[in-house]
Image (spheres, rainbow, N blue to C red):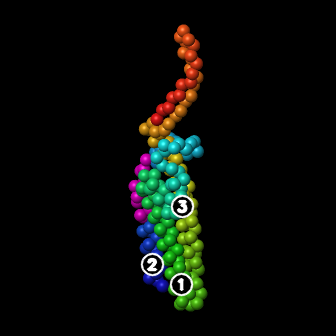
Amino acid sequence: MKNRISCFKNAVPFVFLILFSLNGHAQYTVEKEIYNHRDYIYNVNDRYHPAIAGVASCFIPGLGQIYCNENNRGLRFLLGYGGGILIMMSGAIISTSSELDDGNPSALGTGLIVGGFMLTSGVQIWSTVDAVRVAKVKNMALRSNNGVGMSISLSPSVILTQKQTLGLTLAVRF
């Protein structure tokens, strides 16, 4: 029992060390200061589809961020989710071994299971919402930096010559 608890005590700091040691200087952190995800309007020519990013992160936390080319951010979510699973598994092992020893489940084991479940659920929800925001902000930045997008304007035109000509001008910009 003591070996399992000491194994758990060594695993938790290791998971958090990995989570926070990844390089956090990604382009999204700069772009979100300039662009507000609430101002986003979907465009067919956008590189990253927010719904695809959200669904991907819903199934595998961090996958939507990786889809949007924010690999370190996605790995952090994935490692946080894996850390929550590790905590739940440690709680299950402690609870099961305690139940086998004295017939009662351990309060520590039950607490770890509940805490790990809350961590994995929180990371999964946060990852899904964040992936949608990352996709929106990255698309807005790409539009302004590369001129990606399309605009259509239709305006009336009048040509004054010997014969007055009325017409419409259609301008399409890519």
Please report the bounds of the magenta region as a residue range: 17-27
Structural distance between the alpha carbons of marks 2 and 3: 33 Å
Q: Position of residue 129 (x, y in %)?
A: 56, 55
Examine the image and state in which quarter residue 16 appears: bottom left
Instruction: Determine if residue 67 is in view.
Output: yes
Residue occupying the point 48% across, 72% down: 86
> Residue beneath label 3, please?
58
Kind of residue indicated by mark 2: Ser
Residue occupying the point 59% across, 80% down: 107
Please name which of the two marks, 2 or 3, marks the residue nearer to the observer.
3
Look at the image and say whether residue 20 sits in the magenta stretch.
Answer: yes
> Residue beneath label 1, please?
96
Kind of residue indicated by mark 3: Cys
Residue occupying the point 53% across, 58% down: 55
Q: Is residue 8 depicted above or below 63 in this figure?
A: below
Numbered disc 3: secondary structure = helix
Mark 3, other Cα within 10 Å: few <14 / some 14–19 / many ≥20: many
Of the numbered discs 2 and 3, the one sitting upstream in the chain is 2
- Foreground: 25 or 6? 25
> Residue beneath label 2, please?
6
Of the numbered discs 2 and 1, the one sitting upstream in the chain is 2
- Foreground: 120 or 64? 64
Structural distance between the alpha carbons of marks 2 and 1: 16 Å
Residue occupying the point 58% across, 73% down: 114
